[in-house]
Image (tube, grey):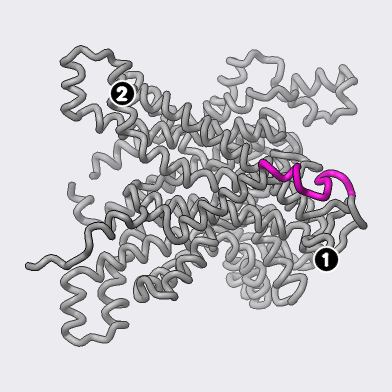
């Protein structure tokens, strides 16, 4: 197992290289001239501006030279400069990453808690009405377009009922808590600003629920199936025969073993949610990496698009690796093989 | 031990899981959507692209789901949207399955360095979050439904390549393949007649389940502004228009429900198929 993990880690730079190359190829597919998005359509007729822009963004070089430069910069952690914000893409991404991570963590929490709850409910009432309802609710989560669900809950809970705040991480007139971790909930607590904490939690509820609902279905199906497997085991029959309450049998005996597969897919769920954040952030004007990606593709800001795509690929690689490690940690049989 | 008496005829006549319950409902509703997509020009009273009434009217007897910012009938546009989403999803799935089959079969059957190179390509493509890669490709090719379709095919084929390769590698070990080699059958014949038919089930089951996901991704790309553009009645694009008229909830309601119904139907059918054929799901 150790050897397997070592190989996995050793292969990562190669995969990263592959990822970066594919992204470079993709960015060269473009029939549209990136100059349009750099200087704007009006300035395209001005040869001086065009020439200056070509020189500045290195568009005069041949494609192999551009590729070599791009790779060299990438190794140094330089993802280029955004056409629209005129800042290094890496800085833009790092600024926006905490917002996305905070949203994703809360969504993961919601997804796992509700998924396990529904899964237990479904398994304990197998083939009865509650089972069908629980599974249906979970399935709807995986069938809903997240951007539409976002609009729907905003309309109901913000516009109609006024129970929860609208889009954004904080109210429009509030000032963000001083930057420590970039997680507003954590930062506000560290500053001792209780009302700020409440505000940022309220702003998280709707987007995180919409995002998290997307994985409830996956978790529910998994927990239900593995709990049913456990129910057929001898030790559960023994526990029941000994006259233990059903609640004890399920919660302290069967569920512990049934949760193992769920723990091992948390990494996968996290990656899934990071992807889903692209759409959720757009609807909720959440200033994270996802909405950055959407703005970048709308404005054809290639360095930014490339940067986000590389970051996404990187995040996927890391989560896959963590998932493998989680398997090994959770199951001694794998660890020792 | 005595066998439990169950009339054999009854067991035999029981329909497979994917022709019962939720799956049957899913199949029927997909059939209805396909029928709507094909026949709507024949029976709709309204033009999906032209104003038919006042702007932003709420649901009424005449316009069941109201009218949008240009006075177009929302229900008509939603039903018309099936003519975009369904053919796009069918094209994406079929193209991705074809490419995946060719590459997966080549990798699994030829083995060696062909296998190594093709599978690394699959690994790297699957290392990306699908929506981000699709966004990057569409943005590079230029926004539009045709380029969104190309992007989705490029993002989707690796699943099928990987699935098919795994099956081909397993089937190739079987003895009847050795027999076929022994009687002097050509490699092409062996692949076509003996290997592929035995390897196809997981690909087909996954393709069914993926249909809904492709509908969802098409709508997502359009919602972002990379797929179909207004005035197209594509569902994602309609939801974008609904978002700009946030307080007129009915504009976004119908296309959203349409997506939900199609994707839910695919999930019902896919779940049952997976259970029937005992196939592992590959999430993209």
Determine if the magenta segment contains residue B125. no
Residue at image location 60% in from the left, 33% down from the top:
B151
State the image coordinates of residue B256 (x, y, percent, origin top left). Answer: 67, 56
User: Are the residues flagged by discs 1 and 2 from a single subunit?
Assistant: yes
- How many marks the image carries: the answer is 2
Residue at image location 57% in from the left, 24% down from the top:
A25
| Res. A143 image quadrant | bottom right
State the image coordinates of residue A55 (x, y, percent, origin top left). Answer: 75, 19
Q: Report whether B163 appears left or right of B22.
A: left
- The answer for which chain carries disc 1 is B
Residue at image location 54% in from the left, 25% down from the top:
A71
- In terms of secondary structure, where does tag 1 sit? loop
Q: Report whether A271 appears left or right of A208.
A: left
Q: Nearer the viewer, residue A86 or A280?
A: A280
Q: Is residue B93 above or below residue A287?
A: above
Can you name the residue that lies furthest to the left here?
B1
Magenta part of the chain: B38-51
**Mark 2 neighbour class, 10 Å CA radius: few under 14, some 14 to 19, many 20 or more:** few
Earlier residue among tags 1 and 2: 1
State the image coordinates of residue A146 (x, y, percent, origin top left). Answer: 62, 56
- In terms of secondary structure, where does tag 2 sit? helix
Cα distance between the residues tagged 1 and 2: 58 Å
State the image coordinates of residue A179 (x, y, percent, origin top left). Answer: 64, 60
**Mark 1 neighbour class, 10 Å CA radius: few under 14, some 14 to 19, many 20 or more:** few
Q: Is residue A51 above or below residue A130?
A: above
Q: Is residue A308 above or below residue B240?
A: above
* Residue position for label 1: B60
Q: Is residue A323 visible?
A: yes
* Residue position for label 2: B193
Residue at image location 33% in from the left, 47% down from the top:
B277
């Amino acid at each position: 197992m150790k050897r397997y993990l070592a190989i996995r880690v050793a292969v990562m730079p190669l995969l990263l290289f592959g990822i970066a190359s594919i992204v470079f190829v993709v960015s060269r597919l473009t029939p549209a001239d990136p100059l349009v998005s750099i200087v704007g359509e009006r300035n395209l007729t001005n040869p001086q501006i065009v020439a200056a822009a070509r020189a500045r963004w290195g568009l005069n070089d041949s494609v192999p030279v551009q590729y070599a430069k791009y790779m060299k910069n990438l190794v140094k952690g330089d993802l280029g400069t955004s056409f629209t914000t005129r800042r290094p893409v890496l800085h833009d991404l790092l600024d926006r990453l905490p917002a996305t991570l905070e949203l994703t963590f809360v969504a993961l929490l919601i997804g796992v808690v509700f998924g396990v709850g529904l899964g237990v409910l479904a398994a304990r009432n197998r083939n009865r009405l509650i089972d069908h309802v629980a599974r249906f609710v979970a399935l709807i989560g995986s069938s809903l377009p997240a951007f539409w669900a976002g609009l729907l809950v905003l309309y109901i809970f913000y516009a109609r009922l006024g129970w929860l705040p609208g889009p954004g991480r904080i109210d429009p007139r509030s000032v963000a808590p001083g930057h420590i971790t970039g997680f507003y909930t954590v930062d506000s607590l560290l500053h001792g600003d209780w009302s700020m904490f409440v505000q940022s939690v309220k702003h998280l509820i709707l987007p995180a629920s919409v995002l998290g609902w997307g994985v409830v279905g996956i978790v529910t199906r998994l927990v239900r199936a593995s709990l049913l497997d456990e129910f057929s085991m001898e030790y559960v029959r023994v526990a029941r025969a000994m006259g233990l309450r059903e609640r004890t049998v399920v919660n302290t005996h069967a569920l512990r073993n049934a949760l193992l597969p769920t723990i091992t897919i948390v990494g996968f769920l996290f990656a899934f949610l990071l992807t889903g954040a692209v759409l959720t952030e757009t609807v909720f004007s959440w200033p994270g990496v996802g909405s950055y990606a959407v703005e970048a593709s709308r404005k054809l800001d290639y360095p930014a698009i490339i940067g986000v795509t590389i970051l996404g690929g990187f995040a996927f690689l890391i989560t896959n690796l963590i998932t493998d490690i989680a398997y090994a940690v959770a199951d001694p049989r794998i660890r020792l093989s | 031990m005595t066998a439990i008496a169950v009339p054999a005829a009854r067991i035999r006549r029981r329909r497979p899981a994917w022709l019962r319950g939720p799956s049957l409902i899913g199949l029927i509703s997909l059939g209805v959507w396909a029928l709507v997509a094909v026949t709507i020009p024949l029976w709709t009273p309204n033009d999906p692209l032209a104003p038919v009434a006042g702007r932003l009217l709420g649901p009424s007897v005449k316009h069941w789901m109201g009218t949008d910012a240009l006075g177009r009938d929302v229900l008509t546009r939603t039903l018309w949207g099936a003519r975009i989403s369904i053919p796009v999803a069918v094209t994406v799935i079929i193209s991705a399955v074809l490419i995946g089959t060719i590459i997966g079969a080549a990798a699994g059957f030829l083995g060696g360095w062909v296998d190594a190179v093709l599978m690394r390509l699959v690994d790297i493509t699957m290392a990306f979050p699908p929506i981000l890669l699709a966004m990057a490709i569409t943005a590079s090719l230029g926004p539009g439904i045709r380029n969104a379709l190309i992007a989705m095919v490029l993002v989707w084929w690796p699943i099928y390549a990987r699935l098919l390769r795994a099956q081909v590698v397993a089937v190739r070990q079987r003895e009847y393949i050795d027999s076929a080699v022994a009687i002097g059958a050509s490699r092409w014949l062996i692949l076509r007649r003996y290997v592929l038919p035995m390897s196809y089930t997981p690909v087909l089951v996954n393709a069914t389940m993926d249909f809904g996901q492709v509908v969802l991704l098409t709508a997502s790309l359009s919602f972002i502004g990379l797929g179909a553009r207004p005035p197209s009645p594509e569902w994602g694009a309609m939801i974008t228009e609904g978002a700009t008229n946030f307080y007129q909830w009915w504009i976004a309601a119908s296309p959203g429900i349409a997506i939900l119904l199609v994707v839910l139907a695919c999930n019902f059918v896919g779940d049952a198929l997976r259970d029937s054929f005992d196939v592992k799901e590959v999430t993209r």
